[in-house]
């Protein structure tokens, strides 16, 4: 197992490599990551919809959603939230702020495309018709709840979410084999889903899926008045904007803390233990 100081050095090397990826490679990898997270969201929602007890459904969904980050890390793709750790080599002067910003922007757009693809696939393949349209009703209700959050709540839930997501990526670097990486990332992702924290890339699937579902008459009939808040404008400005800012704060904050703890001593000629 790699110790935290070695993880910090690995994170710096990984961040440098990610920042150097050409857009022609970066964008397709980002689309794949958005799609993988969306597929995990479909699976988690399907599990929850199949259970009558809301608490049991939440627990089942939290157990399944870590499949998304598993696919991202093991299959190889680029996820906006995890790439906030590129801030480590930025702090060390190995990656310029401009290169960091360019990476995050391109990955964000690619993740959005992948999330929309997953949402369209779930809705227009009529996967949401499972459980007598109960899956669709749940998807619409979940999206409406996300669009009803206050700016402050969405931001803070975004901070806590990406603290856990980046911690999951960090912990996965402790393992040298696939099984160890999956075991390490599972619990931080499980926690963020169970607690209802907000992940901008996951929401690129969840909210568009709810909006698209309203265009299917059979699904819209079960939506209720709460779905009135489900608009593209509310998706972008009431949820995605504050959640993205919170995710940035949480991920970059964790990167800054670990850079101070594990890499500052190396600058002074005292390698971190």
Image: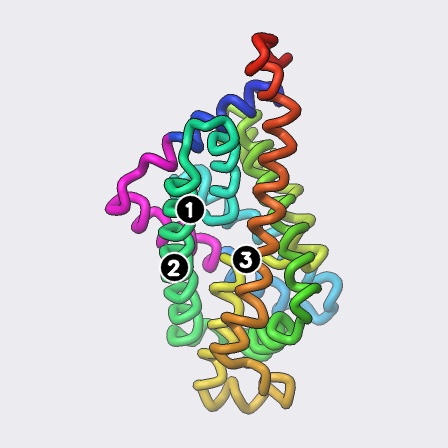
Q: Does residue 229 lie above or below 85 as drawn?
A: below
Give the side of residue 35 with respect to residue 63, left or right.
Answer: left
The label number, if any, that marks residue 133 in the structure image: none
Can residue 18 be seen in the rendering of this structure?
A: yes
In primary-sequence order, the first of circles 1 and 3 is: 1
- Label 1 belongs to which residue? 101
- The span picked out in magenta is 17-39
Task: Kindly identify which residue carries mark 3.
Answer: 244
Q: Residues within 10 Å of mark 2 (few under 14, many from 20)?
A: many
Disc 2 designates what residue? 114
Q: Position of residue 272 (x, y in %)?
A: 61, 14
- Label 1 to label 3: alpha-carbon separation: 14 Å
Q: Residue 257: name its quadrant.
A: top right
Q: Residue furthest top?
A: 269
72 in magenta: no
- The secondary structure that most of the magenta stretch takes on is helix
- Which is in the foreground here, disc 1 or disc 2? 1
**Which quadrant holds the N terminus?**
top right
In front of the other: 66 or 248: 248
Sequence-wise, which precedes: disc 1 or disc 2? 1
Element assignment for label 3: helix
Cα–Cα gap, marks 1 and 2: 20 Å
């Amino acid at each position: 197992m790699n110790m935290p100081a070695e993880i910090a050095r690995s994170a710096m090397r990984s961040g440098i490599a990610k920042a150097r990826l050409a857009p022609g490679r970066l964008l397709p990898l980002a689309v794949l990551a958005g799609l993988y997270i969306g597929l995990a969201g479909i699976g988690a929602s399907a599990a929850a919809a199949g259970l009558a007890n809301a608490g049991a459904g939440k627990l089942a969904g939290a157990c399944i959603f870590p499949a998304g980050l598993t696919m991202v890390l093991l299959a190889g793709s680029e996820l906006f939230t995890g790439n906030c750790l590129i801030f480590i080599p930025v702090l060390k002067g190995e990656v310029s702020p401009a290169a960091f910003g360019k990476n995050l922007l391109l990955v964000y757009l690619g993740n959005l495309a992948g999330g929309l693809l997953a949402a369209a696939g779930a809705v227009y393949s009529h996967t949401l018709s499972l459980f007598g349209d109960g899956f669709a009703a749940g998807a619409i209700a979940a999206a409406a709840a996300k669009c009803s959050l206050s700016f402050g709540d969405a931001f803070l839930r975004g901070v806590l979410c990406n603290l856990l997501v980046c911690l999951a990526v960090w912990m996965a670097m402790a393992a040298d084999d696939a099984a160890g990486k999956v075991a390490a990332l599972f619990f931080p992702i499980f926690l963020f889903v169970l607690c209802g924290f907000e992940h901008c890339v996951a929401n690129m699937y969840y909210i568009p899926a709810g909006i698209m579902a309203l265009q299917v008459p059979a699904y819209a009939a079960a939506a209720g008045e709460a779905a009135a808040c489900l608009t593209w404008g509310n998706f972008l400005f009431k949820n995605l904007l504050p959640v993205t800012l919170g995710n940035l704060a949480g991920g970059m904050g964790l990167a800054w803390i670990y850079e101070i703890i594990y890499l500052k001593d190396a600058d002074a000629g005292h390698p971190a233990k």
